Image: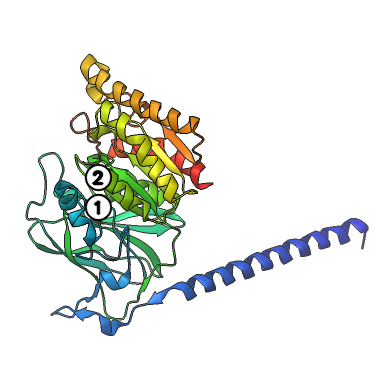
Amino acid sequence: MTRGGWRTIEMMLAVVALLVATWTYGAHEADEAREELVRLDPNMAAPSPGGEFLWYDARAVGVEGRAWEATKSFYDRLPAKAETVVREPVWKLSLHSAGMAVHFVSDSNRIAARWTVRNGNLAMPHMPATGVSGLDLYVKDQGVWRWLGTGRPDQSPTNEKTLATDIPHGSHEYLLYLPLYNGIESLAIGIPKGAALAKAPAQPKPLCMYGTSITHGGCASRPGMAYPALLGRRLGYPVINLGFSGNGTMDPEMGELLAELDVSAYVLDCAPNMDPALLSERVVPFVLALRKARPETPIVLVENIAYQQGAFLPKSRESYENKNQAVRAAYDTLMAEGIGGLFYVEGKTLLGTDGEATVDGTHPTDLGFMRMADALEPALRRCLGL
C-alpha cells in the first residue's frame, strides 16, 4: 500500500478514536446526570378519584426561586422574621409567588397541575389572569427552553388543568412557573400512573433581582415572560424575584435581607419607584452594605426605563432623565471609591424607541420584557463570566 493510503487509514482511525472517546464521555456525563436525578416514590402521590393522575406535591419535587427556608408559608418570598421588619406593603406583596418555578424531569406523556391561590382577584385591569394567577410550563428541547402550556385560571381558589398532552417518548426537563401577582396555598403536579417524576439536577447559585412592579412581572401575559424568568432560562440560572410593586425603594432593611443571600449576582432595578432625591440618598449606602456583606458578588445597577410618553411629552422625559442622572452619579461615586464588581445598564435601551412595548407607558408587555432581557443579558453574561 502506498504511503498516502496508510496516511488515509491512520486519519480514519484517529477520527474513529475521537468519536468513540466523545461518545464514551457523553455517555458518562449522561450517567452522572441520571445519578443526580431523584425519582419520587409514587407512594408519595395522591391518586385522582378517577385514577387518571397521580398528584405530587410540588414541595417534594423542588421549587426554585425561594430565597429563605424559614418562611411563614412555603411559597412566601420573604422570611417570617421580615413581617415585623419591612414595611407592610412590602410584606403583603412578598406573599406573591413571583419568580418561583418547579423544576423537574418526567417521562410522562401528559402533565397536569392543580393549584390553589390566596387572592380571589385573578386578574387586573391591565394584566390578564394567566399572568396574575396562572401557571406557565416550559420544556427543554435540544438544549433550548420552549413554551409548552399555560394553566389558565378560570375560578377561585382552585384550578385543575392539563397543561400538555401527547408528549414525545423519553424523559424531558421542565420548568413550571408560578403566578406573578397572586400567592399560592398549594400546588400539585399530575402525571399518569406508571410515569416517573424526578427532581431536576443541581443548579448554580441563583440570581437575585430586586426592584419594582416591572421586576415583579407587571404586566406579562404569563409568568414565563417576565424579564427575570426570561433571563433565568437564557443564562441557565434560577432566579429569586424580589420585585415589590410600587415598593422597590432600596429600604435599608431590604438591603440587610438581600445581604443574607448567597447568590451569583444581584440586579438592582429600583429607579421607577424612587425620585431623584431618594436615589441620591439610598443607592450608595445600599450598594456599600451589599458589598460589605458579599465582597465578591457582582452587582448590576439598572437605570429607569424611558417612559414611553417621554418621546413626545417633555415632563415625562425629564422625569426619567433626572432619575437616571441620580443613578449615574451614585455609580460614579461608587467607582471613585474603588468599589469593584459593579455593572451598569442604561435605561434608554430597555424598552426600545418605538413606544410599542408597554400597556400604559410604564409596565412592559411581553414585547417589552423581551427587550428588557435583551438589554440586561450582556451585562449579566459579563458579570457571570459567560
- Quadrant of residue 323 within the rendered picture: top left
> At numbered mark 2, what does the secondary structure look like: helix, strand or loop?
loop
Q: Position of residue 32 (x, y in %)?
A: 53, 72
Asked whether residue 226 is in view, the answer is: no
Q: Position of residue 151 (x, y in %)?
A: 20, 58
* Disc 2 and disc 1 in contact, CB within 8 angstroms: yes
Asked whether residue 81 is in view, the answer is: yes
Q: Amino acid at mark 1?
A: Ala
Mark drawn on residue 219: none
Q: Amino acid at mark 2?
A: Gly
Label 2, label 1: how far apart the Cα atoms are: 7 Å
- Residue at horizontal 77 percent and vertical 62 percent from the top: 14
**Circle 1 residue:** 98
Mark 2 or mark 1, which has the lower sequence index? 1
Extreme-bottom residue of the structure: 43
- In the picture, the quarter occupied by the N terminus is bottom right
CA neighbours of label 1 inside 10 A, class few (<14), some (14 to 19), many (20+)? many
> At numbered mark 1, what does the secondary structure look like: helix, strand or loop?
loop
- Residue at horizontal 31 percent and vertical 21 percent from the top: 321
**Circle 2 residue:** 217
Left/right of residue 277 with respect to residue 329 in the rendered view: left
Left/right of residue 374 with respect to residue 225 in the rendered view: right
Question: How many numbered discs?
Answer: 2
- Residue at horizontal 31 percent and vertical 45 percent from the top: 210
Q: Position of residue 278 (x, y in %)?
A: 26, 31
Q: Position of residue 45 (x, y in %)?
A: 24, 79
Q: Nearer the viewer, residue 168 or 31?
A: 31
